[in-house]
Amino acid sequence: MAPGKTASKTASAVAPEDDKNPVRPVARPLAMVLFGSPGSGKGTQAKYLMDWLHIPQISTGDMLREHIRSGDSIGKAIQERMRAGSLVSDELVNQLVFERIGQPDARRGFILDGYPRTPAQAEEMMRLLSAAGAGEVVIHLVVDYNVIIARMSGRRVCPKCGTLYNSVSRPPRVEGICDLDGATLVVRDDDREEVVRERLAQYERQTRPLIEFFRATSDRLIEVDASRDRPEVVFERIKSELKDLVQG
Ligand code: ADP
């Protein structure tokens, strides 16, 4: 499907009983699928979409990190793979997503961030969405490979307060120092160069090919250039592609 092309089975969301919800009150829950390489800005766009549409962000990366933080059996089982930049098993992420989209706050729709990442996940997602009666919109954030490398290698985090910086897009006032508490910034474990390379290799091998699957099967696929402009500008582009989903 050509960029921005709208197929006939356009997805839309159910929101009849909530006046504050801006999504058009029509028959089906809306699944927004954010698709793109690590470092393409999926998490940032997911937050904007969440504020705009009042539907929750479902980030498999966040859910998995939460298990690691809590130290439960799932966390223990996955921490080595996550640390190495490898994907965790399809069975596990499929199960986590299945449980999460069954929660009451996801009944009108949800934003999938970081899922699906493999053919088995994509097929399972289609099954889950069809069982939920949801229609999906896939948003492909298209970013040049070299831009991704530059972005990810410039990422720093404050070990004290967790604030994220980026030497390109969000530099601290003083290089290497947190604006908020003066701590020396560090490179996050999974932003180390060899891990970044592994994450990008995984993406190229297992995830990028899914775009062909979406072209063939999805209700609607939009492709948005996310290489050069600030995140707010990229979001405006997404919004203008999705105007017909939202009232007013
Ligand atoms: P990024 O998109 O920057 O790689 P994420 O937070 O989405 O970051 O993912 C971090 C890590 O979590 C991945 O490298 C992988 O180990 C694991 N992960 C997240 N989502 C999935 C998924 N859908 N399938 C398998 N592993 C996943």
Image: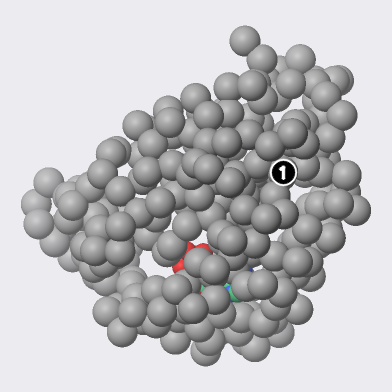
Between 5 and 139, the one nearer to me in the picture: 5
Residue furthest out toward the left: 174
- The residue at 77%/36% (across/down) is 9
Q: Where is residue 199 drawn, in percent x and y? A: 42, 76
Residue 212, percent from left and from top: 59, 61
The image shows residue 40, relative to residue 108, as above or below, that is below
User: 233 and 67: which one is in front?
Assistant: 233
Q: Residue at x 50, y 41 (%)?
A: 3
**Is 125 above or below relative to 191?**
above
**Picture quarter containing residue 146?**
bottom left
Q: How dense is the environment of label 1, judged by Cα within 10 Å: few (below 14), some, or many (20 and up)?
A: some
Element on which disc 1 rests: loop
Residue 21 visible in image: no
Q: Quadrant of residue 67?
A: bottom right
Q: What's the coloring here?
A: one colour
Q: Is residue 71 left or right of residue 4?
A: right
Return the residue nearer the eye: 133 or 76: 133
Residue corresponding to mark 1: 219
Amino acid, disc 1: Asp
Q: Identify the residue shown where x is 53% and y is 29%.
A: 241
Q: Is residue 73 visible?
A: yes
Q: Which image quarter is the C terminus in?
A: top right
**Side of 20 where 156 appears, left or right:** left
Residue 242 horizontal/vertical position (percent): 58, 28
x and y percent of residue 59 in the render? 60, 57
Count of picture labels: 1
